[in-house]
Image (cartoon, rainbow, N blue to C red):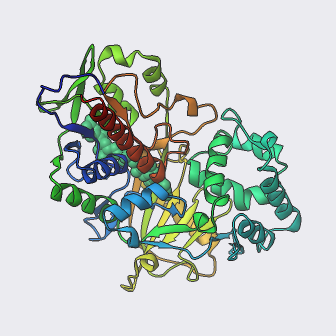
Amino acid sequence: MDGSASSERPQPLVIVGAGLAGLSAAVRLCDAGQPIVLVEATGGGGGRSRSFRHPATGLELDNGQHLMMGCYRETLAFLRAIGNDDAVSFQRNLEVDMVRPGGARVRLRCPALPAPLHLAAGLASMRGVGLLHKAAALRAGVMLRHEAARPDDNETCDAWLRRMGQTQGIRSAFWDPLIWAVLNDDPLIASAAMLVAVLERAFLGTRDDSRLGVPRVPLSRLYVDDALEHLRQRGAELRMGQPMRAIEADADGVRAVVLRSGERIETRTVISTVPPQPLLDALPAAARRHPVFADVARLTVSPIINLWLVLDRAPFVDVPFLGLIGSPLHWLFDRSRIEGHDHGQVLLNCTISGARGLVDDRPSTLLELCRSELRRYFPERPVQVRAHKIIKERKATITHAAGTYQLRPATRSPLPGLLLGGDWVRTGLPATIESACQSGHDAAAAVLEDARRQTAFGL
Ligand SMILES: Cc1cc2nc3c(=O)[nH]c(=O)nc-3n(C[C@H](O)[C@H](O)[C@H](O)COP(=O)(O)OP(=O)(O)OC[C@H]3O[C@@H](n4cnc5c(N)ncnc54)[C@H](O)[C@@H]3O)c2cc1C
């Protein structure tokens, strides 16, 4: 990669960050026989997809409810590699229930037809939405196939939906919940090109691609613990709880990763999978001035709030999760039902995406909001909150505002020897689990390609 002499002692490849991007890169490279050192700031890893024991209730809670889709191919490949692909419950076919204030349901059920006919049939038979609105959605589906209908990254979802003639009725029951969920941002500012990237993967491939998947076990058990064990068993060096302070470079590129302890790990190849700010903090000053990294510095973040409630009973009983139409709470997940627990109480997760307007509210205000929304949407089934835990992830994802995709860097950075991973790099996808795993696999593929090239040239 950098032309270093073959007489030098082989140096390990250093992967920084043990979130999904770092873990997927590490597992892929370890399985290919590459010696690696994995450097992670926290003791447990997992980054933004992790779980923890809540002292007050003894429950194992996720930092936030995470949904997958059938089109998460890189994530599923990672889960297969660590033996956990059966720990996610996938729907047989796409089914989504939404509820209006007062309890009326909107129901999307996609039948077992080839894609995208399954979605067309599902939309056409959608319960709780008028004909005019369904026709608008079907029209958008047909128009999506035409080049002129495709948005570029500067068009917002709002502008694009108006251009596609989408009615308020189908927006509130279908488009807006989808946009908040997959882009973690307001349709008024989110990029339509990012939305279309998801629509293509989810709805224009196979029918299975659009199915939703919910983890049956807490996130660290699903993604992290077994990945770390997999790496340990294959001889990887794990440096947990040891933050990177700096990446050192010379005229040829990367030379070393320096830990906060002062220890220097010499290497010519680093895969950094940390979020934008810790990466910028670690870069040599000259590299930070490069236009690619100057763009990275312009990326901003969008928060997610998760409220975990222990209830005396479930506010709904027929489905594992439910979207709320017209509420600041976007989704409710009955975790007790999903995990198959019945302890005489119910663990409910309430998710608020793109929560800029609420993230500074006091926990008591958020709890009251949640209580009153449950009363508003489920007046027939009042519930008692017995315990709660509120998690504000202020930097849940980068903002997918229109015009920001071009700020995201490619896998190969301008600093020789530095490869970039993380859900926020240029994967063609919004910052999601799948983007993180794809970025990790892309970085691993680049390392393996370089190794093959060096071998071919006898270096
Ligand atoms: C509440 C919430 C809900 C979400 N829901 C969904 C969902 O439903 N579906 C979905 O697809 N995605 C969802 N996401 C997004 C998903 O969690 C992320 O896309 C994914 O976890 C990002 O993984 P990553 O490896 O790119 O980054 P991270 O998880 O941020 O990992 C980076 C790692 O680097 C470490 N690190 C940072 N600085 C240093 C340093 N100096 N030295 C060493 N290590 C360092 C961190 O500790 C961390 O472990 C959600 C995110 C949140 C927060």
Q: Nearer the viewer, residue 165 or 1?
A: 1
In the rendered image, the quadrant that contains the C terminus is top left
Tell me if 117 is positioned left or right of 448 in this view. Answer: right
Is residue 149 positioned above or below 51 on the image?
above
Residue drawn 59% across and 71% down? 375
Q: Position of residue 152 (x, y in %)?
A: 70, 35
Which residue of the protein is positioned furthest toward the right in this rendering?
132
Residue found at x 28% / y 23%: 2
Q: Quadrant of residue 203?
A: bottom right
The residue located at (67%, 45%) in the rendering is 187
In this rendering, the answer to whether 335 lies above or below 420 is below
Is residue 305 visible in this depiction of the protein? no
Residue 252 rendering spot, x and y as whole percentages: 27, 17
283 with respect to 131 (left or right): left
Q: Quadrant of the N terminus?
A: top left
Where residue 373 appears, x then y in whole percent?
Answer: 59, 65
Residue 351 can be seen, yes or no: yes
Residue 207 rendering spot, x and y as whole percentages:
64, 68
Q: Quadrant of residue 411?
A: top left
Residue 210 higher or lower than 345, as above or below: above
Between 41 and 354, which is closer to the camera in this rendering? 41
Image position of 9 (left or right of 459): left
**Nearer to me, 76 or 363:** 76
Q: Residue at x 69, y 65 (%)?
A: 115
